[in-house]
Amino acid sequence: MKALKAHYDGKVIIPDEPVDLPTGEPLIITVKRTRKPKKSKGKSVLQWMADNAVGDDGLPPDLAHEHDHYLYGTPKRGNSQA
């Protein structure tokens, strides 16, 4: 058994150092992370939304219910909650 340091480029695993193996030889590869991924130290999305909420009397009162109409120009769904 041989341990190799390598990295993943999104498509293939690439050794970080020269490898002395016969070409075409079948292998079994076990992947083990050498370090844990860093956790985000930022706020959660919900906390960010609460912190950045906007109160604006100029916004339509049915904005939440008719968001597709205001974003994409689709016909209003009707049954407005306002």
Image (cartoon, helix red, strand yellow):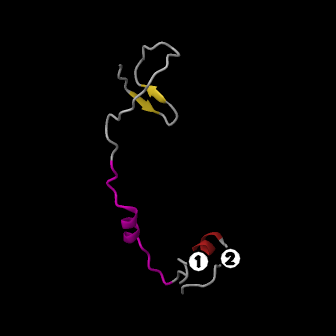
The prevailing secondary structure element of the residues shown in magenta is: loop
Residue 30 on image: x %, y %: 39, 29
Kindly identify the residue that appears in the image at 34 percent across and 60 percent down.
43
Task: Give the image quarter of residue 81.
Answer: bottom right
On residue 66, which mark appears?
1
Q: From the viewer's perspective, is residue 10 above or below residue 82?
A: above
Q: Which residues are magenta?
A: 39-57
Kindly identify the residue that appears in the image at 63 percent across and 74 percent down.
69
- The residue carrying mark 2 is 75
Name of the residue lying farthest toward the bottom = 82
Q: From the viewer's perspective, is residue 22 above or below residue 60?
A: above
Kindly identify the residue that appears in the image at 34 percent across and 57 percent down.
42
Residue 9 on image: x %, y %: 48, 34
Q: Nearer the viewer, residue 4 or 39?
A: 4
Residue type, mark 1 in image: Glu
Q: Magenta segment: does it hold 70?
A: no
Give the mark count.
Answer: 2
Q: From the viewer's perspective, is residue 33 above or below residue 73?
A: above
Residue 28 on image: x %, y %: 44, 25
- Look at the numbered disc 1 and give the secondary structure of its residue: loop
Q: Nearer the viewer, residue 32 or 38?
A: 32
